[in-house]
Image (cartoon, rainbow, N blue to C red):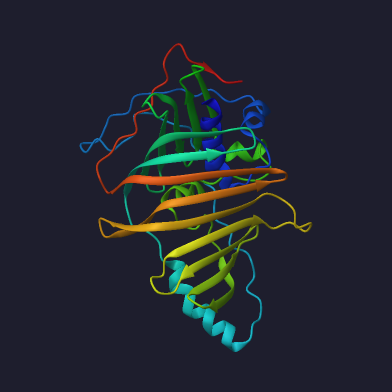
Amino acid sequence: MNRSAGFLLLLLLSATFSSCSFRKLVKGKKPKLYDWHTVQGSSDSNQITTVLPVAIPARQDTSAKLPDHNTDLVKLMDEVKPLWAKRLSYRTFKGKAKMHMEGPDNSEDFTANIRVRKDSVIWINVTALGGISFAKILITTDSFFMLNHLQKTVFAIPLSSAAKVLPTKVDFASLQNLILGEPLRGGIITDAEKKGDTISIVVEDSSYLQQIAYTRADSNMRTASLRMRRKDGDGPTAMTDYGDYEVVNSRKISTHRVLKLVNGNDNYLLEMNFIKNDFDEVIDFPFSIPRNYSYKK
């Protein structure tokens, strides 16, 4: 079951499309230890009870240049801009998802309880099918923490330092978008096409290329692929299928997603079935480190 926790972590960090495994990540650099202090909670109890290190938040790079196009293509790209700009509006999200994972060595099933305070905190409690918690993850714009209850260890690293042990950067926004079922990256539209019942767009920034397909009838995102911009054309790639859209508190969200990662000869799959979704509830993010837990070196 440790592999499931590690793989879920890898998928959360798949917004970075790391060519490293989770084992390489935790061995790559000695983590910095953090002081934990109690914070006076607000009246709505919607506050983390820790103080975390401050770092400069990652900024979205949208420096890709829009090429010259013929008039019809420019008109089409202008037409699809509102579709691309559509995003969920919320303050908090709470969800529960059944997960099925397949990797090169094994396949497993587990459950993830997820809480998000937009642009601020991501909290995930990973449990076995029997309801036993075996990992808890806390991510802020500055930091990443994971408790491994089976090994009684803590993994901690500043989020802004993750690029030192990964081949590319990690940003909070991409992780948040992965959970909410939104496009992983920002960027500008550089190409568009209408074909049958589908509108496809290409979105670029200086680091990534995304191709996203929407269903014309309902404007739902159907598929999204993402790859790094590399001259050799190699590197990890990802494809996500989105389905079973439901309206929850006036917000439409995909409740069934399949994420496929290809990294060299290794193929990974994560199927996510959300059985509960709630928005704008008062939530907390319980995360305390037991005294008998050791920091992972």
Q: Is residue 94 left or right of residue 196?
A: left
Give the quarter of the image for residue 37. top left
Q: Which of the two residues, 17 or 85, is positioned nearer the viewer here?
A: 17
Residue 73 vertical position relative to residue 240 in the rendered view, above or below: below
Q: Is residue 169 left or right of residue 278?
A: right
Residue beneath the point at 25% across and 55% down: 249
Residue beneath the point at 62% across and 45% down: 169
Residue 244: x %, y % from top left = 38, 57
Q: Which of the two residues, 201 or 49, is positioned nearer the viewer here?
A: 201
Residue beneath the point at 43% across and 73% down: 82
Q: Quadrant of the C terminus?
A: top right
Residue 46: x %, y % from top left = 28, 38
Most extreme residue toward the left, as rendered?
43
Residue 282: x %, y % from top left = 24, 41
Residue 131: x %, y % from top left = 36, 27
Give the quarter of the image for residue 290. top left
Most extreme residue toward the right, as rendered?
232
Q: Which of the two residues, 95 or 116, is positioned nearer the viewer here?
A: 95
Q: Is residue 149 left or right of residue 168?
A: left
Residue 134 vertical position relative to residue 206 in the rendered view, above or below: above
Q: Which of the two residues, 149 or 293, is positioned nearer the viewer here?
A: 149
**Does the rendering let one see residue 178?**
yes
Give the quarter of the image for residue 189. bottom right
Residue beneath the point at 53% across and 22% down: 33
